[in-house]
Amino acid sequence: MSQFQSLVEALVILVALCASAIWLRSRSTILQEEQGVFGRLVTDFALPAVILLSLSKVPFSLQAMLPAAALFVVSGAIMVPAWFVGKTLGLKRKVLGSIVLVSGFGGSSTLGLSLIRRVFHDGPVVMRDSVILGEYGGLLSVFTLGVAVAIYFGRDEDEQSSLWDACKPFFVSPIFIAMILGTAISMIGLPQNNLAVQIVEDTLRVAGRSLIVLVAFSIGLSLRPIAVRELAALIIVAVLLKLVAEPLFAWTLALPFELPHLERELLVLQAAMPSGAISAVLAKRYGCDGAVASALVVATAVVSLVSLPLTLYLGG
């Protein structure tokens, strides 16, 4: 099966799981208020397991850090045209902050990782490179650049907010701990054919397989109707910047580095992911327009069902 077919299949499975969550929500089997539970299971259970296993199984490679650095740069750079377009449209400060956040940061560490696992059949090198891309390139940029942007646009003029206090929870989170621990293990290695190591790896592997289910249920429970007419201009801006300009910029930036085809493909796919739910969370948490950010996240997720396979197809 080709990677294009695998991606389409992964998206169909994701949609089916999201629909299952919506159906179960309609029957009150699971409640809309429980979306936070599934979100925390993603960030505190399944995702750390995938990160730790993927990084520790394959020796660390500085080469794999180049695409991560490129994704970090791309996420920051794409916020500049988002700010310029928002200013041109005369958006209010808090709405402007939301469009900047949503345009810059995608779901590379959650949705991206779960899709790539299926597309590339859980290959160890692919998973290591994807984790480094998603965590060091994507998630780290969200909790540094993203938090700074959210604080700047969301605060009142006389409000003083500490960037370190805002970022500190990330640096003590299970995700960050798994990143550092997995990187350290990949550098020093683990004993082979050791029963204790195999049991730990099998446990992490089983926990990690729940990622796509938990991500889908979290998305399904968070979906809300959006006012398409009222937000049409902002939706178009977010879609063009996040789903078109960002992967194109990532591909362009990868050329001077002469990245191998696989790493370039992973970089473009991660950059092409729809806006991450973390963008809406940051917008709401630090005073930007959370409702607008949430609507734009949903809109980019829907459009990505077409744009992601098209990106992979056009990229060969």
Image (cartoon, rainbow, N blue to C red):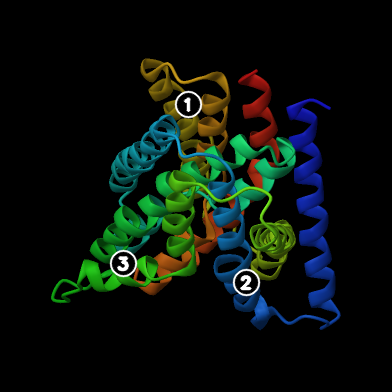
Task: Name the residue: 63% across, 78% down.
Answer: 37
Can you see residue 92?
no
Q: Which residue is mark 2?
A: 41
Can you see residue 73?
yes
Q: Viewer-nearest of labels 1 and 3?
A: 3
Task: Name the residue: 49% across, 54% down.
Answer: 182
Image quarter hosting the C terminus: top right
- x, y (%) of residue 230? 53, 57
Q: Which residue is mark 3?
A: 167
Alpha carbon separation for disc pair 1 and 2: 33 Å
Task: Name the residue: 25% across, 74% down.
Answer: 165
Amino acid residing under circle 1: Leu
190 or 85: which is nearer to us?
Answer: 190
Amino acid residing under circle 2: Leu
Amino acid residing under circle 3: Cys
The circle on residue 248 is 1
266 or 180: which is nearer to us?
Answer: 180
As helix, strand or loop, the secondary structure at mark 2 comes to: helix
Badges 1 and 3: C-beta atoms under 8 Å apart? no
- x, y (%) of residue 93? 28, 61
Is 233 placed above or below 142 here? above
* Disc 2 crowd, CA 10 A, few/some/many (<14, 14-19, 20+): some
As helix, strand or loop, the secondary structure at mark 1 comes to: helix
* Disc 1 crowd, CA 10 A, few/some/many (<14, 14-19, 20+): some
Residue 206 falls in which quadrant of the image?
Answer: bottom right
Task: Name the residue: 16% across, 71% down.
Answer: 157
Q: Viewer-nearest of labels 1 and 2?
A: 2
Residue 169 falls in which quadrant of the image?
Answer: bottom left
User: Which of marks 2 and 1 precedes in the sequence?
Assistant: 2
- x, y (%) of residue 117? 69, 44
Alpha carbon separation for disc pair 3 and 2: 20 Å
As helix, strand or loop, the secondary structure at mark 3 comes to: helix
